[in-house]
Each structure stands twice: as C-alpha cells, then as structure tokens.
Amino acid sequence: MKRVLVIVLALVFLLASFCLFAGGPKEEVTKKIKVGLVTDVGKVDDKTFNQFAYEGMMRAAKEFGLEANYIETQQPTDYDKNIQTFAEEGYQMIVTVGFMLTDATLKMAGQYPEIKFAGVDQFYAEPLPNTMGLLFSEDQSAFVVGALAAMMSKTGVIGCVAGMEIPPVIKFRRGYENGAKYINPNIKVLGVYIDSFTAPDRGKAAAEAQIAEGADVIFGAGGPTGSGGIVAAMEKGVYGIGVDQDEYYTTMGGGPAPYLLTSAMKRVDNAVYNAIKAFFNGTFEGGHYLGTAANQGIGYAPFHDAESKIPKGVKEKLDDILKKLADGSLTTGVKL
C-alpha cells in the first residue's frame, strides 16, 4: 500500500512539473507584441496623415494579433516625451507621423536600439539599423492627376500652385507637368513655387493669376498654400486637384465640391501597415521604404461630387496609366 502511495505521489509530482514547464513558455509565446503611434500635432481622426497612419496600424494589429495604442501630440515640444512614453512602457515598435518628428525619432531610436521605429515622410541621411523612413513617389501620383488635368481641360492651359522648392514638391510639380504632356504634348502648364507651406492667401492669389491666363484646372501641391489655390479654383468655377490626402474631406470639409476632381494621394495607411508587417515577419530593415504604384504606396482619391463630370474613357485611361506605372512599362521621366 505504501509503495502504491509513493508511486501515485511521484506521478502527481511529474504531472505538476510538466504543467508548470508547459505553462511558463506558453505565456511568453502568447504575450502580445505592442505597437504604438505618435501623431504629429493633431488627432487620429483628422482625415490627414495622422488618421491614415492610425488606420494602417490598426489594420496590421487586427491581422497579426498585436496590441496597438496611440498618443496624440498636443505641441511639438512633446515629441520626445511622447515617444519615450511608449519606449518606457515596453513597446517593441513605434510609428511617428510627419517630417517634423524626424529628429525626435532618430534621437529616441539611438537611445532605444532594441525598439523598431517607422517614420512617415521622414528621410534619414544616416538611418540607424532600427529606423525605417516611409517615403513616397510623389511624381507618380502627380503624373496620374496631371494626365487627368489634361484630359479634363478645355482651354489647353492648366496650372500648378506648389509650395517650397524642396524635392517632394519638385517631384509633384514635374510629375504633374509630365503627366499632362503625356496626354497632350502641346498643353501649356503654368506653375509657381511659393516659399511657404502655410500661406493660403498667396496660394489663392497665384491660382487666380493662372486662371486669368486661361488655366481651367489648378493643382495645389503645397499644404495649406496649395489648398488656397484649390479654394480659388472652386470660387472661379474651374477644376481643382488636391495633394497628399483626400482634400474633399480636409480643405473642402466633406463637400459639396463639384469642381474638386481628385487628390494625388500618398497611401500612408499602406506604408505603415507594410512596415509593421515587416517587423512582425522579422524582415524589418533600417533604411527607407518607398511607396510606389507597384506596392500601392501612391494613388488618387475618389472623384466624389465630380464623379458624373468625368467621362468613362477618362477613368479607364487613369486606371491604365496607374497600371503601367506599377508594372514599369511607363515612367514619369522625373529625375532630381
């Protein structure tokens, strides 16, 4: 009897040991990876880059079973603090939104080399192994809307109100010009750079001058400055084209906006999703991601209230151009 009791106790001990051993590692394996997003000044429902980045993060979180959270920056002096909050709370990846966070992102990435960082619209002259700048082929999205402008123009004159003469804006302007000339080699493209992204009054004045010269489509490629050009187009009853995000919701407040054709978009949502996917799959590399037509990193916004004004053939041509840019059979011809 004693012997049976000893055997039973031994079996119980072995079973308990097995359960303890099996339970420990299982908790480690099922512990969720944490991803955080720090916005530029603004909120995650602002219908601009902050919202698109948030949507990309949440799509990845749902697909890969991640824990995701965000911090909405109230003022630029909070950048470092907000990033550090996630770092100190054990987040394994942090997404920061906007070129204004470039320095803060690099600084924090240096202090927390074990954490992966992805920065929207951030170029790193010397990227760290744990930083990925999310950049975009502005010339491709501009090429598509330039082609649209040429097909919709009745005067053979179109305009562009651009912001500061920096590489992304140069690519927007040149891509727009080349896309228009791809459709109509003889089209006249008026354009101007304005040395501020926050001067809608100057953008509006520039657009009005171009409209006076016969332009019947205005591409606003310069933040609020370019948006001023779009507003001028709406007021004059000529077509406008937005940039970066869908300006039907931002500049035009959700409409009605029957003369806003579309916007040349950066697909920030897809870029953020792909960066997180790379991290989850273990393929994350320091450097830069480039959003192109091939990886759905760029595109154009829905036509919204202008839908009925755009002929079927024009829509089919836009789809064809986007497809050719994606497969490489067509290039924008823009080189900086």
Image: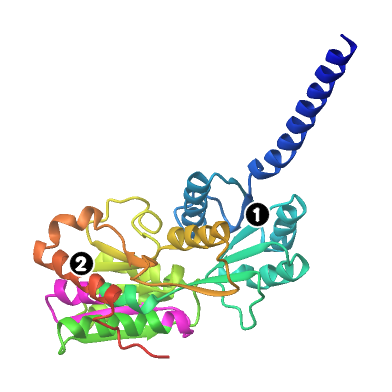
Looking at marks 1 and 2 on the same chain, the residue that comes earlier in the sequence is marked by 1
Quick check: 267 left or right of 176? right
- Can residue 71 be seen at all in this image of the molecule? no
Report whether 110 appears left or right of 120. Answer: right
Quadrant, the C terminus: bottom left
> Which label sits on residue 74?
1
Q: Position of residue 236 (x, y in %)?
A: 24, 67
Three-letter amino acid code at disc 2? Asp
Q: Toward the viewer: 83 or 221?
A: 83
- On whether residue 267 falls in the magenta region, the answer is no
Hey, what amino acid is under mark 1?
A: Gln
Q: Is residue 89 placed above or below 159 in the rendered structure?
A: above
Tag 2, which secondary structure? helix
Residue located beneath label 2 in the image = 319
Quick check: can you spot residue 53? Answer: yes
Give the magenta range: 146-169
Q: Quadrant of residue 226?
A: bottom left
Residue visible at 73% across and 30% down in the picture = 19
Front-most of residues 234 and 197? 197
Which quarter of the rendered picture does the N terminus lie within? top right
Per the model, the C-alpha gap separating discs 1 and 2 is 40 Å
Which percent across, then down, holds residue 266? 41, 66
Q: Does residue 104 appear left or right of residue 195 in this picture? A: right
Judge the density around disc 2: few (<14), some (14-19), many (≥20) Cα neighbours within 10 Å: few
Q: Residue at x 79, y 23 (%)?
A: 11
Residue 140 marker: none
Query: Which residue appears at 75% of the width and 58% of the height?
Result: 84
Q: Which residue extends farthest right? A: 2
Residue 160 drawn in magenta: yes
Please, which residue is most extreme toward the top here? 1
